[in-house]
Image (cartoon, grey):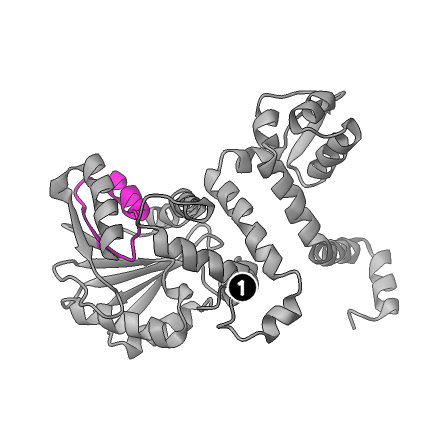
């Protein structure tokens, strides 16, 4: 019925229905033009245009000079961004940040993700071919994560490792903000972040709760480096480093809250269940597992779950976005007694599920 031209014409003539029809048409066009929008946004980030517009209003000739563009090209980029609310021109040839641009200019984590997505876009240049490939066959994205992941505990060597570190550190607040806004730690909480990297998530938690003990479990060189950073900020008495492999080594005991932050969706079902089972074996009765990551089939974040992360993780060669119901079923299979989902203010950044031992 929606595809019928006569129905579309009828909708266009009725005032109330017309608004709905126009909104649907706009949504359909956004699907068609989405890649172009993403590349406009990428241009604002990679050229430093956001930084220029922060000091605005400035003329397009100045933008052209700073970005090494022709005046016509600079105007084309500024006008394209105006349509996306990245820039605006409140006065004659006086350009400044638009509403969306002001938000993104202040968010270094979002900018790091935007720059990182160029790797995903290379793999998505032929999406059908990507889907037909064996998932074990290397892609640009899987090479990035394999290389950067292997080095992320060492001194930064090369572009990939530096990008990895920046991406992890600056984007962690997306999840941390949701946890701090929706979850309350039990009294006398001891928090162990499994796969916690350099401690970015723990750093946010420690700053918000001065009584929280911070435990970091990761590969040996990673855990030591991350714990050292945390100890320098919060003091050695509040921080514990636990080196190990979270699939094969016992998870340290003595913690009443364990967190998995953007970890579970990186792994296929078998390894994910193995990880949950390993964690459950370490928890005393009443302890909690906090799972925080973007999830599938969550109202208000449907596109992020199965569309964006569905294709991203396929290109990465491992993992998938799961719904809260699927994660709850896996947790119960791993031996947890019950689970509870906690609504977050921005599920597009992360949803939260608590599993109780």
Residue 88 visible from this viewpoint: yes
Using the image, determine if residue 172 lies above or below residue 325: above
Of the 4 image quadrants, the one containing the C terminus is bottom left
Which stretch is magenta? 192-217
Q: Is residue 22 left or right of residue 107?
A: right
Q: Residue at x 73, y 31 (%)?
A: 74
Residues 242 and 89: in front is 242
Question: Is residue 301 placed above or below 271 in the rendered structure?
Answer: above
The answer to whether residue 139 is left or right of residue 339 is right
- In the displayed structure, does residue 201 sit left or right of residue 67? left
Quadrant (top left/top right/bottom left/bottom right) for the N terminus: bottom right
Horizontal and vertical percent position of residue 265 = 41, 65
Residue at 87% in and 62% down: 9
Crowding near pointer 1: few (<14 within 10 Å), some, many (20+)?
some
In the picture, measured across the screen, residue 188 lies left or right of residue 109, that is left
Q: Nearer the viewer, residue 171 or 89?
A: 171
Q: Position of residue 326 (x, y in %)?
A: 41, 73
How many discs appear? 1
Residue at 19% in and 64% down:
251
- Disc 1 marks which residue? 139
Position in image of residue 90 (x %, y %) = 71, 24
Residue 209 in sight here: no
- Quarter of the image for residue 129 reads bottom right
Q: Is residue 130 magenta?
A: no
Q: Residue at x 29, y 76 (%)?
A: 332
Residue reaching furthest to the front: 157
Give the quarter of the image for residue 122: bottom right
Compared to residue 66, the image places residue 9 above or below, namely below
Q: Secondary structure at mark 1?
A: loop
């Amino acid at each position: 019925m929606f595809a019928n031209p006569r129905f579309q014409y009828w909708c266009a003539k009725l005032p109330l229905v017309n608004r709905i029809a126009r909104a649907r048409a706009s949504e359909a066009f956004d699907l068609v033009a989405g890649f172009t929008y993403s590349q406009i946004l990428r241009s604002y980030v990679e050229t430093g245009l956001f930084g220029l517009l922060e000091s605005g209003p400035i003329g397009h000739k100045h933008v052209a000079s700073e970005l090494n563009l022709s005046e016509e090209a600079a105007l084309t980029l500024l006008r394209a961004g105006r349509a996306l609310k990245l820039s605006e021109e409140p006065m004659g040839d006086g350009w400044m940040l638009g509403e969306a641009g002001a938000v993104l200019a202040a968010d270094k984590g979002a900018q790091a993700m935007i720059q990182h997505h160029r790797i995903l876009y290379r793999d998505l240049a032929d999406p059908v071919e990507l889907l037909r490939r064996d998932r074990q066959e290397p892609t640009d994205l899987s090479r990035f994560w394999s290389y950067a992941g292997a080095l992320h505990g060492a001194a930064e060597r090369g572009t990939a490792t530096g990008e990895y570190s920046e991406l992890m550190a600056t984007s962690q607040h997306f999840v941390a903000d949701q946890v701090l806004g929706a979850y309350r730690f039990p009294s006398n909480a001891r928090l162990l972040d499994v796969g916690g990297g350099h401690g970015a998530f723990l750093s946010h938690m420690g700053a918000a709760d001065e009584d929280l003990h911070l435990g970091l479990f990761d590969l040996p060189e990673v855990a030591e480096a991350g714990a050292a950073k945390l100890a320098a900020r919060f003091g050695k008495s509040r921080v514990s480093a636990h080196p190990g492999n979270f699939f094969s080594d016992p998870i340290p005991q003595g913690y009443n809250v364990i967190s998995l932050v953007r970890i579970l969706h990186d792994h296929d079902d078998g390894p994910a269940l193995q990880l949950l089972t390993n964690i459950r074996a370490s928890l005393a009765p009443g302890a909690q597992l906090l799972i925080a990551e973007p999830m599938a089939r969550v109202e208000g974040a449907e596109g992020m779950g199965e569309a964006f992360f569905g294709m991203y993780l396929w290109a990465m060669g491992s993992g998938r976005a799961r719904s809260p119901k699927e994660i709850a079923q896996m947790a119960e299979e791993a031996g947890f007694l019950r689970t509870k989902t906690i609504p977050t203010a921005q599920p597009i950044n992360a949803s939260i599920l608590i599993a109780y031992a």
